[in-house]
Amino acid sequence: MSESQSFLKSTSYDFELEVLSRFRYLVTILPPECEIYRETWNSSTVLCLNFEHCPHFLEVIKENIDILTSIIQRLNLPTTVIFRFGNQLKAWRQITPKTSS
C-alpha cells in the first residue's frame, strides 16, 4: 500500500498516538514510566503527564518546563499541561502559543 493510501486510512486516534509518540521521543528527559495523554477540560484539550509510577521525576520535569514548551510549540500540542499523580492534579502550566514569524 502506498504511503498516501495508508495515511488516508488513518484515524484521528492514530494521528494523536503518533503525535504523542513523537512528543515522548523528542522530550528525552521524560521517564518511560510517565504516562502521556490528552484530556478534555470543558471545551479545551490539555496535555497530561502522569507521574504516578515515577513521582520523583515530577519536580525535575517542572523545573525544565522550557524543554516541554519548545516541543509543545513545535508539535502544536495543547497549550495547557497538567501534571498528575494518578487522579490527583499536582500542577499545571499554561504555555504561550508560538507566534508565526
Image (tube, rainbow, N blue to C red):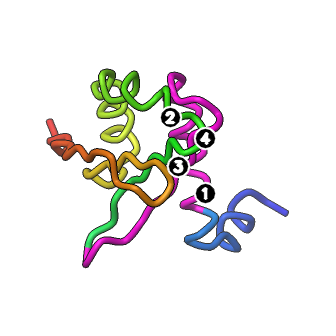
Query: What numbered label is drawn on residue 17?
Result: 1
Question: CA–CA distance between discs 4 and 3?
Answer: 12 Å
Q: Secondary structure at mark 1?
A: helix
**Displayed quadrant of residue 11:** bottom right
Along the line of sight, the residue nearer the viewer: 87 or 79? 87
- 19 displayed left or right of 83: right
**Label 3 crowding class (10 Å Cα cut-off): few <14, some 14-19, many 20+?**
some
Residue type beneath disc 3: Ile
Counting residues from the N terminus, which is met first, the one under dot 1 or under dot 2?
A: 1
Magenta extent = 15-43
38 in the magenta segment? yes
The residue drawn where x is 26% and y is 77% is 42
Q: Quick check: 24 left or right of 98?
A: right
Q: CA distance from mark 4 to mark 1?
A: 20 Å
Q: Residue at x 32, y 55 (%)?
A: 78
Residue at left offset 49%, top offset 47%: 50
Residue 79, horizontal then vertical, whole percent: 26, 51
Q: Are marks 4 and 1 in contact (CB under 8 Å)?
A: no
Q: Are marks 3 and 1 in contact (CB under 8 Å)?
A: no
Residue neighbourhood size for the residue with mark 1, other residues' Cα within 10 Å, grouped as few (<14), some (14–19), many (≥20): some
Residue annotated with mark 4? 53
Residue position for label 3? 36
Three-letter amino acid code of the residue under disc 2:
Pro
Whether residue 46 is situated above or below residue 40 in the rendered picture: above
92 or 14: nearer the viewer: 92
Classify the position of the N terminus by image quarter: bottom right
The numbered disc on residue 55 is 2
> Nearer the N terminus, badge 4 or badge 3?
3
Q: CA distance from mark 1 to mark 2?
A: 24 Å
Instruction: Name the residue type under label 4.
Output: His
Between discs 4 and 1, the one toward the N terminus: 1
Left/right of residue 25 with respect to residue 59 in the rendered view: right
